Image (spheres, rainbow, N blue to C red):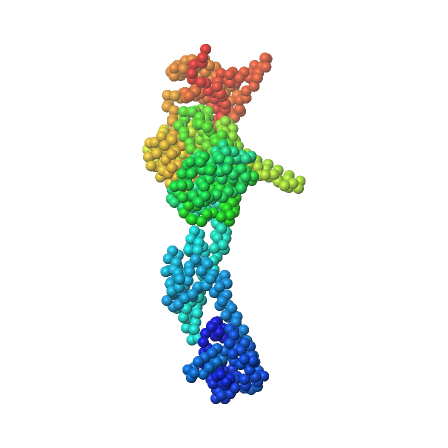
Amino acid sequence: MGDSTFRGWPHHLPDLVSEAVAVVDERGVLTGWSLGAHRLLGIPAEEAVGRPAAGLFADGAEPPHGVAAYTAPGGRAAVLRHHDGGEIPVVLWAQPWAPGDGGRHWLVQATREEAMRRQDVGRALLDSLGTDAPVAMSVYDTDCRCLMQNAALRRLSGLTDEERMGRTLRESLPDLEVTEMEALQRRVLGGGSPVGDVEVHGRVPADPGREHSWCNSVFPLKDRSGDVFAVCHAVVDVTAQARARERLAVLNDASARIGSTLDLLHTAQELADVAVPRLADFACVDLIDSVFEGEEPPSGPVTRETAFRRAAHRSIVPGSPEAVAEVEDVDVHASAPNSPFARALATGQPVLESANGPGPVPAWLADDPARAAGIRVWGIHSWMVVPVRARGSTLGVAVFLRRQRPEPFEEDDLLLADEIVARAAVCIDNARRYTRERGTALALQRSLLPQRLPAQAAVEAASRYLPASGRTGVGGDWFDVISLSGARVALVVGDVVGHGMKAAVTMGRLRTAVRTLADLDLPPDDLLTHVDAHVRRLIAEQADEHQDFAEAGRPPAEPAIDTWAFGATCVYAVYDPVTRCCTFARAGHPPPALVLPDGRTRFLDSAGGPPLGVGGHPFERAEVELPDRSMLVLYTDGLVESRDHDIDAGLERLRGALDDGCHELSLDSVCDAVMNGLLPEHPPDDVALLVARTRALDDDRCASWELPPKPAVVPRARSFVAQQLAQWELGHLVHTTQLVVSELVTNAILHAGGPVKLRLVRNETLICEVSDSSAAAPHLRRAGRLDEGGRGLFLVAQLSRRWGTRYAGDRKTVWAEQPLEVPEP
């Protein structure tokens, strides 16, 4: 388009140099001829001036009424003849002109018809931009002062021409942050390049109660020389698009942030954190009280008597002063049937409501004075109540409030809140289910662990068990203290691979296996060998079951809990208070720590072996003599291993904690010091800790005799027993003990051969032990009336609280225990 396109012709005086202009006197004779006319018709001024104007027309005659016929606004079409004879369609426009000579003249302007059409388009475009265009536009001079604004900008800003003309943006809109927009204007004025799609947010007089978003574009206006003399500022209201983007961003944020853990309170807090401040000024999540315990929510309608407990809240003000309840406190919602809470819970649909406005105060607030007072004090004017529903059940409600942001919630906000609450509800329900499963697993695990450590004289023991936090759930750590024959005690700590219900049940099975084998009085290495074989057998049986399913073309059953035993670890230690000897073996387990009475700590890192279920490698047994009042510390790897450091560093940390005066503390204090010193607030793995302080038996509480394998020695054995019991002031046990010793010594002489050893131990019970060199195990049986033997062990079983047999090397020991107290008559 030519330069004339947007100059608003014919509303200006013609340019006598660049435009085709002629002067015609009252006789119709040409008296003036411009350079533009020369270019248009190819006739120089010296040839044109003095000729009749009618000679310029292609038909050789002027229209009726002469030049006056072309004075109408917009001119009139005509056809002129070029100097070479060609015809040129034009539009002629004439206006009276008085040059000062007293005559009447006409100033006639000619424009090619196609140029005129372009001018018409430009004029219409300019008119439309000023009156009808939906894009708000304004023009600013080189001082950034407004020269004009169109109707769309008047409507958008609410400013009249008087309020805007001659003023900068900052002067006309003092409440709007215009620094960035003014910088754009100066940038375009200085560089001459347009800048577009810059988004600005704020409020304007046309709508002071709502924040808007505008897309700004600034482009230069240049004169004929190409210099920038002004800038045009175009503004498009993109509030709807900006809010749509923000809502989409909130949804994306909700998807990414909500449900990062399986902790119920943390998940509810994530929902509140997503909503504030991007959607609401305050948000809270209240859940039905039973949900916190992992129980199933009510299946039917939620009644007004249902108790709600605050799970989370968040405010734009630190401390959340708007809250009417603290986290985990009961929040009594208004019970009026028309309250938004009751309506949301009854219908399962979100509710939008406003207050503190020109209308009356909602009637339901009369039943909730605490909430009504908070609404007045904090200026809360709009809120949404969204039921938290998942899998067809109502878990609670989420409430969103606005007080600082002046605009009330809209339907689109309600749809957004409903969407993010629906996403959060599934995560909250998953957390509830996890709470229930974890509680069940914890209850199962605790029922499988010792409820209290058994009373015995060999050691003083204390224990701690701390389940893992977070997604890992309950693990398979366990500990045990098992009383053995001969006043000995077994200390056990184990760890099953994995977490959850299956790990807990597997732990129970392994603990039962260890206790059963401990009753056989096996040495620690033999016991672990039997447990290892048991684990491998269970795994093989499970593999066979899966093979059967595969051959039958059926989907395999869920993996059995027994497969979780593969890779389990265990340490088994036996302490004898008579000899002060501790014998232990390990199956892939961290070494026990030994704290001597003087406070020095070392690890018993011998007797290593593979984890259970691996097979193919023997377990080693180690022995160590312990001074009286020594402290044994057994633990699982969760105490010394973490992502932050390896096990060696963890062992050094444990050594440091035990070296820090623990030998002078009570065992409970030792457990607390170790757990608090080594573990974070939320440990990633289960931890089991067993601490035992040894108590040696004094020499005067044990007596032993070497007896030759001759029948005549039996009366002498009875005599030794009577003398020793008299010395121990246990005369009431002489008769029964003599009978027990007679039977056990007689059996050893008859069936074993070799030297026989008799030992009495006064502990919490009176222990009688007879050792011989035979590997044959005695068996209790019922003797017939004519049988000469078989009544001895039966008699021993009747006179004793318990009895049994144990093996050590090539010797066998048969033992029996009797209570020390005098039986009631």
State the image quarter where residue 768 is shown.
Answer: top left
Q: Residue furthest front?
A: 102
Q: Is residue 130 visible?
A: yes
- The residue depicted at 50 percent of the width and 61 percent of the height is 134
Q: Is residue 390 left or right of residue 686?
A: right
**With respect to residue 366, does 272 lie above or below?**
below
The one of 275 and 368 positioned closer to us in this rendering? 368
Nearer the observer, 647 or 427: 427
User: Going 45% across and 76% down the picture, which residue do you hit?
Assistant: 13
Residue depicted at 33% across the width and 37% down the height: 660
Residue 658 position in % (x across, y down)? 36, 36
Image coordinates of residue 671 in percent, x first then y, are: 39, 33
Residue furthest top in the image = 825
Residue 587 shows in this picture: no
Look at 44% across and 24% down and name the residue there.
486
For residue 413, above or below residue 448: below
Q: Which residue occupies the foreground of this view, 742 or 594?
A: 594
Residue 237 drawn above or below residue 744 = below
Counting from the top left corner in percent of width and height, residue 117 is at 54, 73
**Quadrant where the C terminus lies?**
top left
